[in-house]
Image: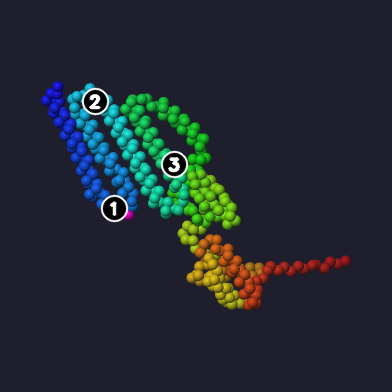
Amino acid sequence: MLGIENYSDVVIALIIITVSAIVAKLANFILEKFVIKWVKKTKTTLDDEILKIIKLPVNFLMIFIGLYFALMQLNLTLNYHSEIQKIFTLIFILIIVLFVDRIINGFIKWYSSEIPIKTDTKFEEQFLPILRKIIIGFVYAIAAIYILSEVFKVQITPLIAGLGIAGLAIALALQDPLSNFFAGVFIIADRRIKIGEYIELENGMKGYVEDVGWRSVRIKTLQNNYIIIPNLKLSQNIVTNYYTLEEEMAVVLPCGVSYNSDLENVEKITIEVAKEIQQNVAGAVKNFEPFIRYNKFDDSNINFSIILRVEKFVDQYPVTHEFIKKLKARYDKEGIEISFPARNIYFKNEKQ
């Protein structure tokens, strides 16, 4: 039969459980009444997602802690305190692991719905599930090592050494795939390139970015060919991104006229043609005022540059094409000469 002492222990245990339930309810009330209302006013939805995740685990954890202290209070369980501690420690670790798992899943869910819209890349669809598995696997591994070491008192030093050797072997075997994977992560995080942008590599390769994958980047050239570049190679390359600041760009065309030309008239005629091109050719920036700059006395011509402006990098090709045709026709009409290099050869008369 239970003695008075035991009855008092039971009463205290029940009080502890009741208090823990009240604290859990109070925490739930504070979250719903104040915290949730406050986070709804913030611009990001990440805090809303995290609150949804932590609400249930926090309540459960408080009741669980109350139950633990209630059982430890009972004299009836004195002989089983060690076993109870092991069981509760095990359950507590599992709760924490599941809690972390939910937090990571919530963050990735939020990131998947928010960030890819801004980055315009499919890499997140491939990268995030892999990253989630790596992080969750790491969390579960740490939890398993702690449980073996602290709960079951297993010597884990040999196990860790074995895992280290196995991990090293796997890392060496997967060196190239892992290098490309993490290089892809850095490319995306650094926002160096995005799908649809026109880029040029230091070796002269250029084209539109079609896809950024976990292993490689696919670039489509103007000739309708694909260039597949491993992420690691691209991350080590000097890349010119023609769309980074804005898609519009200046087009600088070199030209030259003979020394007999009236430079004021040349400037006037050239700008008239350039304005016509800017207004009428698709891809040219219509509100841009073209201009020329004389820059060199050359062997046969006085050289200058004509500055036009186009909406996109590839628009420079049709704009340049039309401008050269129109300018040549107008120069011919106005009698403006574009000289070509001339050489006079003198033969010395030799006595017979």
In the drawing, what numbered circle is on residue 130? 3
What residue occupies the far left of the structure in this picture?
4
Q: Report the quarter where the C terminus lies.
A: bottom right
User: Label 3: how many residues lie within 10 Å, few (<14), some (14-19) or many (20+)?
Assistant: few
Image x and y of residue 208, in percent: 53, 55
Q: Report the quarter where the N terminus lies.
A: top left
In the drawing, what numbered circle is on residue 81? 2
Residue 351 is at least partly visible in this image: yes
Image x and y of residue 168, in percent: 48, 33
- Left or right, 95 with respect to 6, comes to right
- Element at label 2: helix
Residue at the spot x=27%, y=40% of the render?
58
User: Label 2: how many residues lie within 10 Å, few (<14), some (14-19) or many (20+)?
Assistant: some
Q: Which residue does the numbered mark 1 point to in the structure image? A: 40
Image x and y of residue 150, in percent: 32, 28
Queried whether the magenta region covers residue 227, the answer comes back as no
Q: Which residues are magenta?
A: 39-43
Going by the numbered disc 3, the residue's amino acid type is Ile
Image x and y of residue 270, in percent: 58, 73
